[in-house]
Image (cartoon, helix red, strand yellow):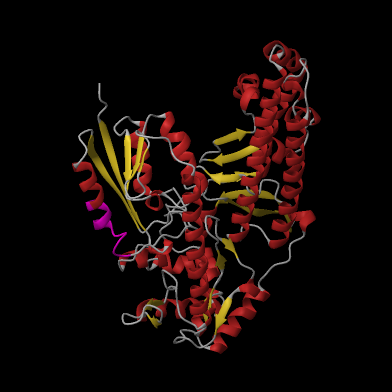
Amino acid sequence: MKTFFNAAAYIRLSREDGDKAESDSIGNQRRLIADYVKEKEDLAVYDTYVDDGFTGTDFNRPSFRRMIDDIEAGKVNCVIVKDLSRFGRDYIDTGRYLERYFPERDVRFISVTDGIDSAKQAYDMLLPIKNIFNEQYARDISQKIHAAVRTKQRAGEFIGAFASYGYRKASADKNRLVVDAYAAEIVRRIFALYIRGCGKLRIAAILNEEGIVCPSEYKKINGENYRNARRLNSTSYWTYSTINRILQNEMYIGNMVQGRKHQQMRNRARTADRSEWIVVEGTHEAIIDKDTWEKTQELLRRRTRNVDLQRNTAVFAGFLKCGDCGRALVKKAYVTEHNGKKSESGVNYYCGTYVRSGRQYCTPHKIGYEVLESIILGDLKVMLQNMDNLKALVTGEFGSVAASDSREAAKITIQAELEKVRKLKKAVYEDYREELISKEEFVSYKQDYAQKEELLVRQLLCVEKRTGSAGENVFDTAWFQRLLEHREVEKLDRAVVVEMLHEIKVYENHRVKITYNFSGEMAPLFADIVDG
């Protein structure tokens, strides 16, 4: 019986890949595939999937993902493209789809102009070479575009997608900035308030109280498809970090500042060192005069506080989150008075949104350090007191597991810890960027996590190399051995928190949700203990 195929007509176009407007146009691809299907009795187009403006070096494209979902759902069992470059220009992922993913799911693949049809013949030896040429072509185009962009930047032309708040692109020349009168007035007011002595939080509160929309919302109101990747989805108001960025933005004195981030093909964008930025003076009308700018920068330098690390070590930095809005909690010392003398007595934590923007955006979620420490210590002590029976439990539960399975379990455990440490590194950086912790604290924690990451990588390599024995079990894992080291926990310190905890969410009325680092095979062993 002849098989009938429900085909996905996949179409892609990207000027960044050097696609030719006429031959590779959406309309031309659509017509070519339609004409091909008309001549085939065993084919019918189930749906057309179009990714317009998406590079072929990345398969994370919306219509491509929708097509894969339809394949997984059994709606589509054939994919048709004009040529291989329309499918993708990353030869590794392209090969994986064509040689593994599609065959495993009995999906027929047809590339019309390349004469490829997997139902008629196996892929020839030239297919990988074609994929490599497609990627190299895209890489060459990427390098040329990058060089062209840098040339425009050095000439003082604006090449960004969105202008800084206070400016807009000139209607006649998108590479030139002109002043947006309304937003520029807000920018001038922010600088004036700061020079008069208002703090960044107070300035944000004033603007919020007056109902002035924040920069991201203002751009949306003006029809721009803008999204700030640095902010939470729930944040639609002025924040400390927004004010801070505006006060340090050199664009406002008429200088074009570009090249803050650098991205190579398929790689994530990285923040460039300030020495690598491209700064061209006097390219557009200034909103802030030089005198005001210099006064502001001097004030910013003066107000940078020096932190005593011995006294201000943030044990929970990077771990505490508001259970409702998701912002990091802010540490605040409280003072008591005895016999007329004031003394710093302890620390409370508050929701960062509440501290910065007020109760209309989130509630305090107040919790004291002592209360939090008591809750966590109580949990940990109960668990560690039950360690005497744990080895027998582990042996009885997992003693018969083969050595290879045990090594795999150890690998999974260490990999999970490694992922956790990397997330914590990112979380601490975000806390530093939001100025919840000082630069000194950030550097200290960063070094902490870097050392821990290096240790875990070495342990992972060790587990992968060792041959193991029949007597191996979960009890021998690196994670478990470090757990044993903390049998007596009388006081929380940074090392214990990093080892034991993944995340702490604080809700109102001292309700706390703690996520521990118990994963894989270890989770069932502690489930009852933790819940108890």
Percent of width and height locating residue 207 = 42, 69
**Image quarter in which the N terminus is found:** top left
Horizontal arrangement in the rendering, residue 237 relative to residue 401 (left or right): left
Tally the marks.
Answer: 0
Which is more toward the observer, 373 or 132? 132
The vertical placement of 369 against 121, above or below, is below
The vertical placement of 448 against 385, above or below, is below
Percent of width and height locating residue 465 = 76, 32
The residue drawn where x is 40% and y is 80% is: 185
From this viewpoint, is residue 338 visible? no
Chain part drawn in magenta: 21-31
**Image quarter in which the C terminus is found:** top right
Quadrant in the picture for residue 340:
bottom right
Residue 24 shown in magenta: yes
Percent of width and height locating residue 126 = 48, 46
The residue drawn where x is 63% and y is 78% is: 299
Residue 341 shown in magenta: no
Which is more toward the observer, 518 or 486? 518
The vertical placement of 76 against 52, above or below, is above
Which is more toward the observer, 204 or 67? 67
Percent of width and height locating residue 388 = 78, 17
From this viewpoint, is residue 202 visible? yes
The residue drawn where x is 71% and y is 22% is: 474
The residue drawn where x is 65% and y is 30% is: 412
